[in-house]
Image (cartoon, rainbow, N blue to C red):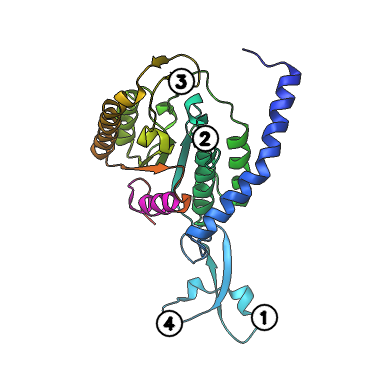
Amino acid sequence: MSLTPANLRARAEGAAAHLPGLVLSAERLAAMVAPGAHGLRRAGPGEDFWQYRPAGAGDGARSIDWRRSGRSDQQFVRDREAQTAQAAALWLSRGQGMAFTGGPDRPAKAERGQVLTLALGMLLLRGGERVGLLGQPPRAGRLQADRLAEALAAAPPTAGDDDQAPAGSLRPNTRAVLIGDFLADPSWLAAFLDRAAALGVGGLLLQVLDPDEVRFPFDGAVDFRSASGALRHDSRDAGGLRAAYLARLAERQDWLRAQTDRAGWLFATHRTDADPAEALGWAWQALGRAPGGGGR
């Protein structure tokens, strides 16, 4: 369905209103997990000037910056800043099922996913890496965090309950992060991870769930409907479904873990009533172990 100018403006204004809170939450979360994270800021192979330093043992005549040295009685070496070849692609599911929350005391899965995605992007950018949403060119620098925030806040939900990460957007020797609930048909993930493995793309998969989706606390007559309205089940004894539901959820998580293990990826589950710093800390450390562009 095409948007009218009025609808487009309303959506843009809504995204803009949400943006400051998203950025602030992500900055706070990133500071909690890795308060000392910053750019590489060290000498090494690269094109950008970093600093002058006094020449020392092991610095040959070819490494001396004679113009700078001529202004003093000491010889100086012109260091360049180390550059990283690493790039990370982040993907957050925009399926309508991500809008679910079981209570006003916790955020929707999409909201938690936005904060985690942006906070992780901020940490990677501070580490000197190039970061982008999957399908967009990865970039480095402080302005890229603003671009990520704007893209996350403005991205509309899909028409269905779930969506798929575009495998065709993967690039060789990078790392990727997939965040979603993975409750709808996840069969696309097997082909995605096959392509990732073939391209040397390592990464991680984070499943974000509401506590009600983990515990299934329903009893009595309950009309279950998917967010998009595509699925519906009118139960007269919801409690009687609990054991079968929990078994299916465990089976789904075992399948997700098996697929990621096969591709050399890492898998974890995060509940929206849990501390987001725990999930971000896991992702930050896990990416350091993930293949693709080398570890930190």
Q: Nearer the viewer, mark 2 or mark 1?
A: 2
Residue 164 image point, x, y percent? 43, 25
Which of discs 3 and 4 lies nearer the camera? The answer is 3
Q: Bin the neighbour count of mark 1 within 10 Å (Cα to Cα): few under 14, some 14-19, many 20 and up.
A: few
Q: Which residues are magenta?
A: 278-291
- The type of residue carrying mark 4 is Ala
Do tag 2 and tag 3 residues touch (Cβ < 8 Å)?
Answer: no
- Amino acid type, residue under disc 2 in the picture: Ala
The kind of secondary structure element at disc 3 is loop
Front position among marks 2 and 4 = 2
Pointer 4 residue: 57
Residue that mark 2 sits on: 110
Mark 2–mark 1 distance (CA, rounded to whole Å)? 58 Å
Percent of width and height locating residue 127: 49, 57
Badge 1 marks a residue whose secondary structure is loop
CA gap between label 4 and label 1 equals 21 Å
Figure quadrant of residue 1: top right
- Which residue shows up at 26% across the image and 29% down it? 243
Amino acid at the residue labelled 1 = Arg
Residue 256 is tagged as none
- Residue 36, position as x, y percentages in the image: 51, 65
Q: Identify whether 94 is placed above or below 140.
A: above
Label for residue 226?
3
Precedes in sequence: disc 4 or disc 1: 4
| SS for dot 2 | helix
Q: CA distance from mark 2 to mark 3?
A: 15 Å
Relative horizontal placement of residue 43, taking residue 167 as reference (left or right): right
* Residue 282 within the segment the image draws in magenta: yes
Q: Which mark is residue 71?
A: 1
Q: Is residue 174 visible?
A: no
Q: Nearer the viewer, mark 1 or mark 3?
A: 3
